[in-house]
Image (cartoon, grey):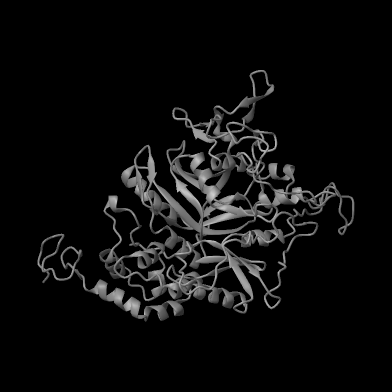
Amino acid sequence: IIRVQSPDGVKRITATKRETAATFLKKVAKEFGFQNNGFSVYINRNKTGEITASSNKSLNLLKIKHGDLLFLFPSSLAGPSSEMETSAPPGFKVFGAPNVVEDEIDQYLSKQDGKIYRSRDPQLCRHGPLGKCVHCVPLEPFDEDYLNHLEPPVKHMSFHAYIRKLTGGADKGKFVALENISCKIKSGCEGHLPWPNGICTKCQPSAITLNRQKYRHVDNIMFENHTVADRFLDFWRKTGNQHFGYLYGRYTEHKDIPLGIRAEVAAIYEPPQIGTQNSLELLEDPKAEVVDEIAAKLGLRKDTYFLSSEECITAGDFQNKHPNMCRLSPDGHFGSKFVTAVATGGPDNQVHFEGYQVSNQCMALVRDECLLPCKDAPELGYAKESSSEQYVPDVFYKDVDKFGNEITQLARPLPVEYLIIDITTTFPKDPVYTFSISQNPFPIENRDVLGETQDFHSLATYLSQNTSSVFLDTISDFHLLLFLVTNEVMPLQDSISLLLEAVRTRNEELAQTWKRSEQWATIEQLCTAMWACQHCTFMNQPGTGHCEMCSLPRT
């Protein structure tokens, strides 16, 4: 999937690595409705790195890979309009980067009124049913007194409520610009020698005083059902080791908080890793891009990761890799919706879930490599000191001394509580199932250490134990779909789009159409070649006369 951004928005183009640039540009022209010579596509936003219609250069040779963002600019009036229509609430004036395409949930919330409407108070209101007074007039979504009196109290307003606060008032946000913090020396200063031999006030980054962030980009994490979390926790129950997983889901409106956003979790992907009771090492994942592509076709996105120990620097790194697109920022992005869920033990000796993000200040410190962990005190971080290789601005935080006075401390070390934003984590009263739940589910990927492997033997076992007449129920398993795409014997990456659309839309007719395909027939032949032992039900490889498990004869 290659993303192409034009003045009218972003569209996704399906292409292969071996596809020529000429073929790719024809697809772009068809998708955007241009004539073949009515536009230009560039690798960089500043119109450098133009992609020409060459039949000799492949996308792989041009170093264009899955997930890359290219930029399209019309070169004639025959193409689409160069002005991008943006929707905004009354009094909301857009500054920063107007051509940025925000997430669907952000576009939806920006159109909502957001005000908190109150009914007429029979004791305090002295007016008629059509009047309004200070006791019943609608409140703004950022009203702190209202948020503090909710049950439970809300410490952080939603990001869109924060935007309404910035763009409210008499000037309607005329001078608002959400600028990302930078801890690096500004380049291009020619009045002195480069660091460490020289620095000036123009290129020197400002000192940072850590403040508890008043807003959060995501207000709630909700698992669709208990089974999603239980299957992940099953690894810890069997090994006692730390474990890691990417949570895939979607962003929806969180109606309990004004203009809030909820991350709904539908599936968990467990990448290759080595875990112990006290450590965790992530390995290179050759299937990462394919997993993201399959999830996108299912209407899901990587919005969370699941970790069994707190790690602010890791969270900050992931949030930097998944920025939140924002039109109010000159950079086109501000903060991140990527959140962290932690499975941990509680005072009642039960496993429970905690959600959090790190603040935008922490993201900047991590991005510019200014924050270090403390080995002997995990609850503390440490701001690096400047060296000949890197200039690090001073980092401070405010504290209260034993006399009750507010003092400013140098962040060497600093409590990580200044960097963390809590997010509530919940399960719905009425479970939701994007994927089917089976008594005998298909094995989860990368669990070889438990003896659980994904192969055609496990696929044959799964199909023999799940004989539902509704094919869509049998095939709607996230880990099964990943296996069908990534297995080495019969990968279906180029022919599974119809099935993914069927699963996304819950369309049994589309699923049956795909079931009649030649590819699924080949998969079934590979599975039926195996035989089940009549004595222990173990699925054996074809061509064997005795069971590999119990050693009894086949007949």
Left or right: 263 with respect to 239?
Answer: right
x and y, in percent, of residue 356 in the image: 55, 44
At x 71% / y 54%, what residue is drawn? 96
Residue nearest the viewer, comparing 555 with 390: 390
Q: For residue 205, what is the image quadrant?
A: top right
Q: Residue at x 47, y 57 (%)?
A: 225
Where does residue 348 sit, x and y in percent of width and height? Answer: 45, 38
Which quarter shows the C terminus? bottom left
Residue at image coords 70%, 53%: 328
Look at 45% across and 53% down and name the residue there. Answer: 246
- Position above or below: 553 against 136: below
Q: Is residue 12 visible?
A: yes
Q: Where does the image place residue 354, in percent across and percent down from the top left? A: 51, 44
Picture mark count: 0
Nearer-the-camera pick, 532 or 358: 358
On the image, which quarter does residue 101 sit in?
bottom right
* Residue with the most extreme top position: 403
**Could you tell me residue 393's position as x and y percent?**
61, 33
Residue 255 vertical position relative to residue 82 in the rendered view, above or below: above
**Can you say whether 52 is above or below 92 in the image?**
below
Q: Which residue of the protein is positioned furthest toward the right in this rendering?
A: 127
In the image, 28 versus 163, the foreground residue is 28
Residue 149 seen in the figure? no
Query: Along the horizontal axis of the image, is 342 left or right of 520?
Result: right
